[in-house]
């Protein structure tokens, strides 16, 4: 049975110019339409979202993989936090 989970994922971006609007668009293009996107700290991208999954670990892994496919090459998952 699936449950609703809310998470925040923080990604470390590769050095260089990372346009905040472009990063936000990438998150939405990856399918996270209701996500809150934070780009206020240089070199980091925070994404807060809700999703359904069988368990929390699957939810985080699935979301991180989906986002990493769309983010700049060299981006790394830095932090995860379950909100509820």
Image: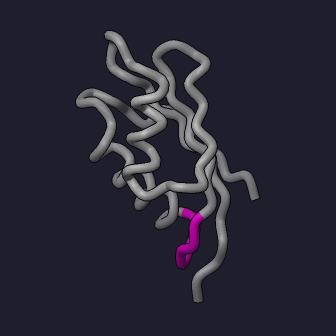
Number of marks in picture: 0
Q: Residue visible at 47% across and 28% down?
A: 21
Q: Residue visible at 40% across and 30% down?
A: 22
The answer to if 19 sits in the magenta stretch is no
Between 64 and 47, which is closer to the camera in this rendering? 47
| Side of 12 where 68 appears, left or right | left
* Residue 41 in which image quadrant: top right
Between 76 and 21, which is closer to the camera in this rendering? 21
Residue 63 in picture, x, y percent from top left: 45, 56
Quadrant containing the N terminus is bottom right
Quadrant containing the C terminus is bottom right
| Side of 18 where 74 appears, left or right | left
Colour mapping = one colour
Residue 7, compared with residue 77, is above or below; it is below
Residue 43 in picture, x, y percent from top left: 46, 16
Q: Residue at the far left: name it.
A: 73
Q: Residue at the far bottom: name it.
A: 1
Q: Residue visible at 61% across and 19% down?
A: 40
Between 29 and 12, which is closer to the camera in this rendering? 29
Residue 65 in picture, x, y percent from top left: 35, 52
| Side of 50 where 19 appears, left or right | left
Residue 8 in picture, x, y percent from top left: 62, 45
Residue 40, compared with residue 9, is above or below; it is above
- Residue segment shown in magenta: 51-56
């Amino acid at each position: 049975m699936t449950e609703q989970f809310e998470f925040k994922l923080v990604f470390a971006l590769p050095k260089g110019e990372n346009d905040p609007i472009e990063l936000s668009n990438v998150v939405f293009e990856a399918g996270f339409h209701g996500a809150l996107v934070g780009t206020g700290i240089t070199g980091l991208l925070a994404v807060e979202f809700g999703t359904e999954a069988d368990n929390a670990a699957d939810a985080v892994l699935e979301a991180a993989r989906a986002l990493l496919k769309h983010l700049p090459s060299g981006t790394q998952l830095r932090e995860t936090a379950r909100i509820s």
